[in-house]
Amino acid sequence: MKIAMAQVNSRIGDLPFNTSCIINIIEKAKASGASLVVFPELSVCGYPPRDLLNFDPFIEQCLEAITQIASHCNGIAAIVGGPDFNKGNSGKRLFNAAFFLEAGKVKQVYHKGLLPDYDVFDEFRYFEPAKSFRIVEFQGKKIAITVCEDIWNLNQPALYSFTPMEELIEQSPDLIINISASPFSWNHCLERLSMVSNNARKYSLPIFYCNQMGAHTELIFDGGSSVFNSAGELVDSFEPFTEDLRVYHLEEIGKMKAREITESLSEDDICMLLHDALVMGLRDYFHKQGLKKAILGLSGGLDSALVLVLAARALGNENVWAILLPGPYSTDHSVIDARELAQKLNIRYDIISINDTVQTIMQAVEPLTKDTIPDTTEENVQARARAIILMALSNKFGHVLLNTSNKSEAAAGYGTLYGDMCGGLSVIGDLYKTQVFSLARFINASQEIIPEHTIIKPPSAELKPDQKDSDSLPEYPLLDSILFKYIEKQMTPGQIVASGHDADLVNKVVKLVNNSEFKRQQAPPALRVSSKAFGSGRQMPIVAKHL
Amino acid sequence: MKIAMAQVNSRIGDLPFNTSCIINIIEKAKASGASLVVFPELSVCGYPPRDLLNFDPFIEQCLEAITQIASHCNGIAAIVGGPDFNKGNSGKRLFNAAFFLEAGKVKQVYHKGLLPDYDVFDEFRYFEPAKSFRIVEFQGKKIAITVCEDIWNLNQPALYSFTPMEELIEQSPDLIINISASPFSWNHCLERLSMVSNNARKYSLPIFYCNQMGAHTELIFDGGSSVFNSAGELVDSFEPFTEDLRVYHLEEIGKMKAREITESLSEDDICMLLHDALVMGLRDYFHKQGLKKAILGLSGGLDSALVLVLAARALGNENVWAILLPGPYSTDHSVIDARELAQKLNIRYDIISINDTVQTIMQAVEPLTKDTIPDTTEENVQARARAIILMALSNKFGHVLLNTSNKSEAAAGYGTLYGDMCGGLSVIGDLYKTQVFSLARFINASQEIIPEHTIIKPPSAELKPDQKDSDSLPEYPLLDSILFKYIEKQMTPGQIVASGHDADLVNKVVKLVNNSEFKRQQAPPALRVSSKAFGSGRQMPIVAKHL
């Protein structure tokens, strides 16, 4: 039996687009002799559709799309993910389902049993967990279909009180198929491979793992669909961040050469993944909304330089516009470095001084502020003057403003709300500053693209004379190490101190994070590439006493 | 047996504050002869603590607080809500628990069975649902303790596949106690009373319903704790939005006079509730963060006038500062109306023209925009010039900027991101414009507080000559009617048309709502007073094709 897997880039809510894409792939798979073609979780509507699921007619349209897709399943079967109504007399309205389509109709429906509800996942908001599970018989083979989290219950203590595979294995399946929508994060991809492998080994069955790719606002899906033999060895895996259709002889999985699974990713591997994830995230944000053009403020610093490179790669240099906005404390080299980069990338740039704007605003408030001393107010006015100019150009010419803040700044609240925190999308908002350096070095590896001076000069917001980030923040390697423990590892200040950091410094950093929660809740969505990004995956109260 | 109920205003995460407040009330209840005193759901840490629950030491501190509270329970028992570890070998880390404290220690722990996960609720993110339920025996009485949603499963089809009271009733309880954290919404309060009453009647038992009051960022809890006799009749209810402790003779509940439960609220009732909810919401946002002073832009229009009145009532007129920011298209009467209101309320106001700022910004971009025609860009620059001036004063003097947008604007995207959408807190962001009118009339009922002219003049953003809101939006009663059906009722455009609206208009309005999702996700938190507010309760994707 030949089984095809389709790693597709669905569009949230765009049922006509997704349906026609799925039908085309079914035809292709049939032409290549496949008996069965597998699509990712909720592929008919894209994952995550969020509160679109609350509208009954939306579900009805999804079911109609499934029927339409089924009508193309002649001479080939397909597994397609989509929402299904719960027809029982209690529980949530919906199931998260895998539809098995054969002979022109829906032959069997499998409902997901384990619903993730942590970090960016909120499946209990919509779905009822299934409690019983049946294999599908097809061409003499018994298939254990599972949906994403269904195979993620091997850890101890188990997060869920039952495991669908335990019931399915009693029915003597010949193989496992898992359809997923498992998002990318640089510190999670190996864990995913290992979890799929462990299932293959535990149940002594080959697994076909089919994962969604593509980006949906902040969530990035790499795909990385793969096949494991019954010994748990990886025998094939798809290119990440790429749509693809591959066909396998089920009978030959056991004979395919096993590939080594690396135990840890090198810094270069990680940079490559981050780079490709962010480029796809940017591209999908624009193209899925029918948008083409981006604008950004290019400061001469490293953050905006990196965003410019990524944007040029994602959208084409002709679609990116850089604005240099020197202010009263900008250094000459900032303008020089920014211009050099724009010229090297062949990107249109313009220079607009913010000095008059800043001066006029300070004059406007002068009758009220004349007896005060300078503080961060004056710095914020500069950041906001830049934002108001960028937004004027964005509005006038229809370019989407890209935000260029990094995660260290966002964490520490080292940014101006309605100033440098503006933008439709935060491109590197889930990269710590130390990762920004690494990615810049990675991009420059074979050829200097980002001016060396931009990388080596001390980071500065240039909002007052001779300002350096290190005046108010610890050096970034130290800051990022504490932030990573607090945010990704969810360690308390006490635990971070016990891990070897200075108590005063830890308390200062944690306080900065907690006190700037109100800022982050008004920040643009940030492309998520870590296991704990700011945004929907980290829900902290604003009015609260923190740890 | 005398039972006391404490409607308390907890502080999220502030365990020392909450603990000391609970202990004080226990002493008071004991002094008044009560045998048992009841506190709301998660009262030890406040509801909702959100991702603070992900930190184990936070849970440990909650449990220590419970132990400390228990040590004060001598001669009196207490029921206190808090998180508890799940000591089983599978499932989520935590339970949402009611601790029964007696004789100086924790006598019994009840775990919540039904976990809400819809609208603003996300309890599956943190908690494992309990599957078995035991009554508590105390002074010869059998008490069925339940936590909030546990008694919310009487509708058909049932949202949950089991009902804790069905198991508890088998154990022959003498009364039901429900501890809750059920947030306020104007179109939900009667449903809540009716649900509690239905439980009393169904199980023929008196119910003591103890609900949290106080505001936590956007979430507002009215309290409205109440007692029902075993016939389901309301015999007492607490004042909403007020902390209180009341004591009841259990044996006399059956003899207490039943109060009428109104079938529907009058417009005046609703306005009173909205008024009190917003005043408390504002006050708690400030005072729980140790903040005192607010600033806002007073335009002469109705929205900012209403916010000024509410802010003066919540914070004291001496703590509110109004800035009048006339621009190139402001009418004289706007400044006159704004000044009249500020003077009447004895609120400090200052006038700063935005004209120079607007002109300077337009000059700054002029080399790039000179061949373009005026559009919304020029309007947005005016709104953002106001924001940058307000934020400069906010930063300089430490006043929190209040946002004055209403729900109709937020829905239709009729507001400028980083302009009039700025602020730490949106005060009336969950009031449709028609509700803003009603509330203004309510405030003016006995005496003109808001200038009549502010109420009767046609709404205008005054961003271009002779502009009226009705130039680009339908009249508000019509707009709000469509918005209510789309947002609160979750009807699709087709269903709204079928309910009697013009198809083109419905499609236009729905498109405005969908296309402005990116704006709302960067809006400040808005005090939630409806059953479906923008914010955490409505999670729509940005990059998506909508219905």
Image (cartoon, coloured by chain):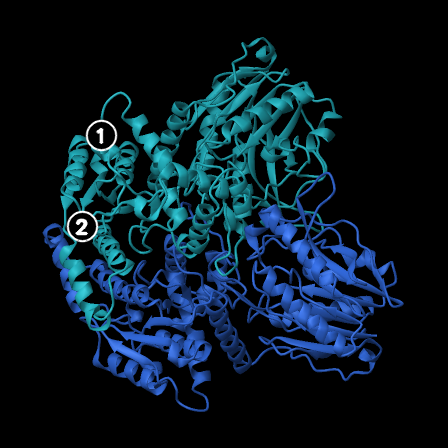
Chain colours: A cyan, B blue
Tell which of A115 and A185 is nearer to you. Answer: A185
Residue in view at x 14 percent, y 54 percent: B365
Q: Is residue A414 visible?
A: yes
Residue B56 percent location from the top left of the image: 62, 46
Residue A378 percent location from the top left of the image: 24, 59
Number of dots carrying numbers: 2
Which of marks 1 and 2 precedes in the sequence? 2
What residue is pinned by disc 1?
A452
Check residue A466 in the rendering and tell me which mark sits there, or answer none: none
Q: Is residue B299 left or right of residue B183?
A: left
Residue B252 percent location from the top left of the image: 82, 80
Q: Is residue B198 above or below residue B441?
A: above
- Check the residue under mark 1 and report the chain it is in: A
Q: Quadrant of the N terminus of chain A?
A: top right
Q: Residue furthest right?
A: B140
Check residue A329 in the rendering and tell me which mark sits there, or answer none: 2
Q: Is residue A442 left or right of residue A98?
A: left
Quadrant housing residue A103: top right
Q: Amino acid at mark 2?
A: Tyr
Residue A334 percent location from the top left of the image: 18, 41
Q: Is residue A451 visible?
A: no
